[in-house]
Image (spheres, rainbow, N blue to C red):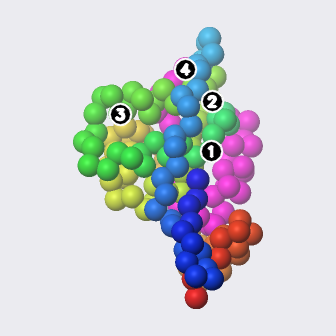
């Protein structure tokens, strides 16, 4: 959820909001779980949803219910552990023979995420989506305004 705080004649966008993790999915009979085969990172308004849709349209890729897990958002200061690794791996049930992953743009912002990812999903392919920073900024402003958030002067 995005929060705002009212100021005279304007709203201030608070980008540090952390989203809750989606619930852990069930693993149907005959399926397997394990670390993801790919993890997408990047920044908001950099085409992450478009790339997610392209990757998960492939017949060899299982498309999970949620694109963004935000699994590592609240783990700042945590050391990699078996509990973190097992909890993360359980979030990727898939039919045998298919690959699966996630795409959480926020992972590019949090300095603790790369180390955790390296330890809990060492074989995952890391996909990064970037965009011209000025174009991204303008797109982000338009997106925020469509959502009713007006930036400060």
Q: Which mark is residue 84?
A: 3
C-alpha separation, residue under disc 4 versus residue under disc 1: 19 Å
User: Which badge, 4 or 1, is on the more N-terminal residue?
Assistant: 4
User: Which badge, 4 or 2, is on the more N-terminal residue?
Assistant: 4
Q: Is residue 41 left or right of residue 150?
A: left
Image coordinates of residue 14 in percent, x first then y, are 51, 67
In the rendered image, is residue 3 in sight? Answer: yes
User: Which badge, 2 or 1, is on the more N-terminal residue?
Assistant: 1
User: Which badge, 3 or 1, is on the more N-terminal residue?
Assistant: 1
- Mark closer to the observer (4, 2): 4
Image coordinates of residue 50 in percent, x first then y, are 71, 57
C-alpha separation, residue under disc 3 versus residue under disc 1: 19 Å
- Which type of secondary structure does the marked residue at label 4 adopt? loop
Q: Residue at x 52, y 40 (%)?
A: 21
Residue that carries the numbered disc 2 in the rendered image: 98
- Which type of secondary structure does the marked residue at label 3 adopt? helix
Q: Are marks 3 and 4 in contact (CB under 8 Å)?
A: no
- Residue 123 lies, with reference to residue 3, above or below; the image says above
Residue that carries the numbered disc 4 in the rendered image: 32
First to last magenta residue range:
32-60
- Which type of secondary structure does the marked residue at label 2 adopt? loop
User: Which badge, 2 or 3, is on the more N-terminal residue?
Assistant: 3
Quadrant in the picture for residue 136: bottom right
- Mark closer to the observer (3, 4): 3
Q: Are marks 2 and 1 in contact (CB under 8 Å)?
A: no
Q: Which mark is residue 67?
A: 1
Q: Residue at x 59, y 34 (%)?
A: 99
């Amino acid at each position: 959820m995005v929060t705002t705080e009212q100021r005279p004649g304007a709203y201030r966008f608070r980008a540090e909001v952390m989203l809750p993790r989606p619930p852990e999915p069930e693993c149907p009979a005959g399926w397997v779980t394990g670390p993801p085969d790919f993890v997408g990172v990047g920044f908001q308004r950099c085409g992450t949803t478009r790339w997610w849709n392209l990757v998960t349209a492939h017949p060899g890729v299982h498309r999970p219910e949620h694109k963004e897990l935000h699994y590592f958002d609240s783990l700042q200061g945590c050391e990699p552990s078996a509990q973190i690794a097992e909890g993360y791996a359980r979030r990727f049930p898939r039919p045998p023979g298919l690959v699966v992953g996630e795409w959480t743009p926020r992972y590019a912002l949090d300095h603790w995420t790369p180390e955790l990812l390296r330890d809990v999903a060492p074989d995952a392919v890391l996909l990064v989506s970037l965009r011209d920073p000025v174009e991204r900024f303008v797109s982000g402003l338009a997106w925020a305004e469509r959502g009713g958030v007006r930036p400060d002067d």
